Image (cartoon, rainbow, N blue to C red):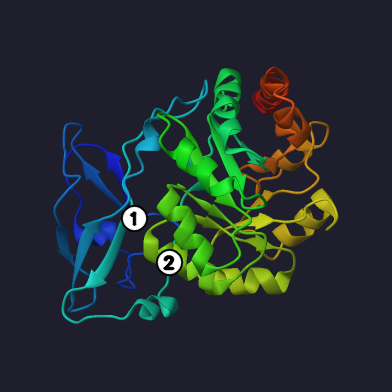
Amino acid sequence: MLEILPGVGSAPASDILPPSGHLWSGGRPATIPLAADDSRETGNLSFLVVNLSERVVIRPNNPFSHFNSPQPTGSRPPRRCLTFQWHYNERDRPEDAYAGMPTMSVRFESLFPWKLVPVVALDRAADAEPLAEALEAAGLPCAEITLRTAAALEAIRRLAGRDRFLVGAGTVHNVDQVEAVVEAGAAFVVAPGLNPKVVQSCRRRGVPVLPGIATPTDLELAMELGLSYVKFFPAEPLGGVRMLRALAGPYHQMRFVPTGGIRLDNLLDYLRLDVVPACGGSWMVARAWIAAGEFDRVTEETKRALQEIARLDE
């Protein structure tokens, strides 16, 4: 994946690619500056890989139009950004050949500038749009719809077609589910555990993935897979902030999105950690409130959460 940033001029290959010759390095997206009025969303971009004799063709895949969604006060301005998959044009590679390739993690601060991801279980797909309206009214236009109910895929489809709303899929366990949620329009995938096949499937499809980890062994595998962003789950039962502080020592290069037991009263304890760019939580999208149609309570509690997050800048 390449992150395309608005800009002026062009960058030499040595600035785009790390010395190793791979497109990915250290979890940081390579960038190609584009003029503000550049409209190259189609076609191929080709350049020579540094220190390698093979040419790589970069093909557009899965434009992330949601980067133009409203940004919270004090955040960076919206950025035009596309995701790309790549292949060697000198020879064909089977899909599983990507498994050993280094990769990068999408910058989840860019995906989730609000520092909070509502983790939602919907019993009725018809509740998806009223829920989105409630979250938007609070200033949080995103949601992770978990595959814990039969209504989840249809809910993702409905929200994927909603302008200026970022929807992802959670509780993804296997490759078939990855295929289903991507087809439904999920912009990102979250998994409760670390399944290499799920990570590789998301990578091939150009979809950001946030797999769950619980132990140093999980983190070693995540690093081997080229990930730098992971879900810390279930956060509170695993030891919460104390456990994350302990993991941040030997794994300071990793970034954790804690989920599981996050509440309004402990949210800032997590977000004050340098290794935590965002948290996932369900308390502001309580299943009982949604079932009862009490979407005003969703808006009210979400506003309280965002007000709490704003205290980080005080």
Q: At label 2, which amino acid type do we have?
A: Thr
* Residue visible at 22% across and 78% down in the picture: 52
Where does the image place residue 153, in percent across and percent down from the top left?
Answer: 53, 48
> Which residue is the site of mark 1?
30
Q: Name the quadrant of the N terminus.
A: bottom left
* Residue visible at 71% across and 44% down in the picture: 273
At label 2, counting other C-alpha atoms closer than 10 Å, the crowd grade (few under 14, some 14-19, many 20 or more) is many
Where does the image place residue 167, in percent across and percent down from the top left?
Answer: 50, 40
Q: At label 1, which amino acid type do we have?
A: Ala
CA–CA distance in space, label 2 to label 1? 11 Å
At label 1, counting other C-alpha atoms closer than 10 Å, the crowd grade (few under 14, some 14-19, many 20 or more) is some
* Residue visible at 61% across and 36% down in the picture: 115
Residue 274 as seen in the image, left or right of residue 56: right
> Which residue is the site of mark 2?
103
Where does the image place residue 182, in percent across and percent down from the top left?
Answer: 43, 54
Can residue 65 be seen by looking at this rendering? Answer: yes
